[in-house]
Every structure is written in C-alpha cells, then in structure tokens.
Image (tube, rainbow, N blue to C red):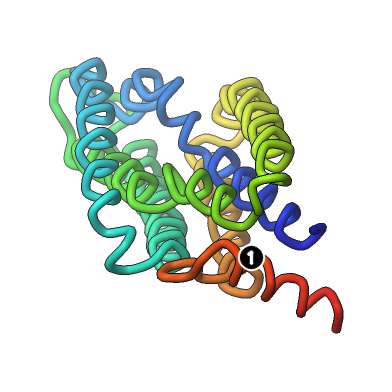
Amino acid sequence: MRRPLLISIGLHMSQQLSGINGIFYYSTEIFETAGVKQPDLATILVGVVLVAVTLVSVILIERLGRKTLMLYGLGGMAISFTLTTICFCFQEAFYKSDDDQLTAPGVLSVISALLVVFFFGIGPGSIPWFMVAEMFLQDARPAAVTVAVIVNWTTNFIVGLAFPEILDALYPYALLVFAALCGFFWLFTYWFVPETKGRTVEDIVSKFKSLTAK
C-alpha cells in the first residue's frame, strides 16, 4: 500500500510545512515586528480562532468532504500568507519608525494572520488525521498512523527550528516561503489525494489496489 502511505505522508507534511506552527510559536514576535502594540492579545486571538474553526470543520467535513476542505484550507492559507506579507511590506516601508500609534498595516497583518489560522483550522489542521485512518484497513492502520505521527512531529520540529532564522533572514518576505509551500501542497492534494467522503474503507483500499495494478 505504497500509494496511500505516500499520500498520508504528504498530508501530514502539508499540515506542518504550511507554516502554521511558526505563527503559533512566534506570533508575539511577528506582531511586534509588524507594529502591533498589544501582540499578546493578538496571540490569544489566534488560539481562540483555531478552537472555534476546528469545531466548525467537524460539522463541515461530512457536508463538503475531506479533499474539498483541504483545498479550501491550503488555498486560503497561501492567499492569507501573501496578504500578511503585503502588510509587513507596507509596515516596513512607511511605518517602521512609528512607535506611538497602532498602524493600519499592523491591524491588517493581525487580520491576515487570523485568516491563516482560520483556513488551517478548516483543512490542514484536522483533515490529515481523518484521512490516514480512512485509507487503511485495520491491520495496516496502526503502522500507517505511526509513520504519519513521526513525519508530523519531525516536520513540526524542523519548522520550529527554522522559522526564526527564515523570519530574520527574509523579513518582510519570510511568509512567502510558506505561501509557496501551501501552493505546492494544494497541487499535491488536487492531483493525488482521493475524496473519501461517503466511502467505506474497503472501497477506498480497493480503489488504491486497482490503481497499483495498472
């Protein structure tokens, strides 16, 4: 079952390499750099949005489907990272020395970052865990989930380690790296990830076997 395993690995890589944990780990520093005067409040908002939208995604997952939510999520994250970068550029160009006022780019950067979290919550935040369980029969599922967890935490570690270096080296364009990665994984999801909504595990596994036979 090489194909579903590779898809599972790709989905979990997309969850972490989307850059979301960079937002979580360093949100205070990001918002401070962007000129936000209450970065701790912005960080709290990030957590609140994630919890709320994750609950919403549980409702939407059976209505819209797993693949559809992944595509919405990754596409929305790519666009939101780009918008956040534009806000950072305006902040850097026109407001860098303004230490006394809350700037428009600062506010918009917070909104854009919250949109990143929103789109993560409806797609990459939860869908990979659902899909790994749905693509394997019971005998192969524990091994597949183990591999997925290893990949997930390894990429989590890499992003956590690399993000501050990327931010320092490429600011205000650092988040474009993750916009590009989200775009890449959007294409991966579109071309290779099957829709599992309304299908049994046996049907999904049978489909993978038929594709392998070809």
Left or right of residue 45: residue 193: right
Which residue position holds label 1? Answer: 188
Dot 1, crowdedness within 10 Å: few (<14), some or many (≥20)?
some
Which image quadrant for residue 197? bottom left
* Quadrant into which the N terminus falls: bottom right
Give whichever of 61, 33 is nearer the camera.
61
Figure check: 179 above or below 110:
below
Give whichever of 157, 194 is nearer the camera.
194
The x, y position of residue 195, in whole percent, is 50, 70
Q: Is residue 86 visible?
A: no
Figure check: 197 above or below 70:
below
Q: Is residue 108 visible?
A: yes
The x, y position of residue 214, in whole percent, is 85, 84
Give whichever of 146, 158 is nearer the camera.
146
The x, y position of residue 174, in whole percent, is 54, 39
Rendered residue at 46%/37% (across/down): 20
Left or right of residue 77: residue 56: left
Q: Residue flagged by tag 1: what amino acid is it?
A: Phe
Give whichever of 58, 168 is nearer the camera.
58
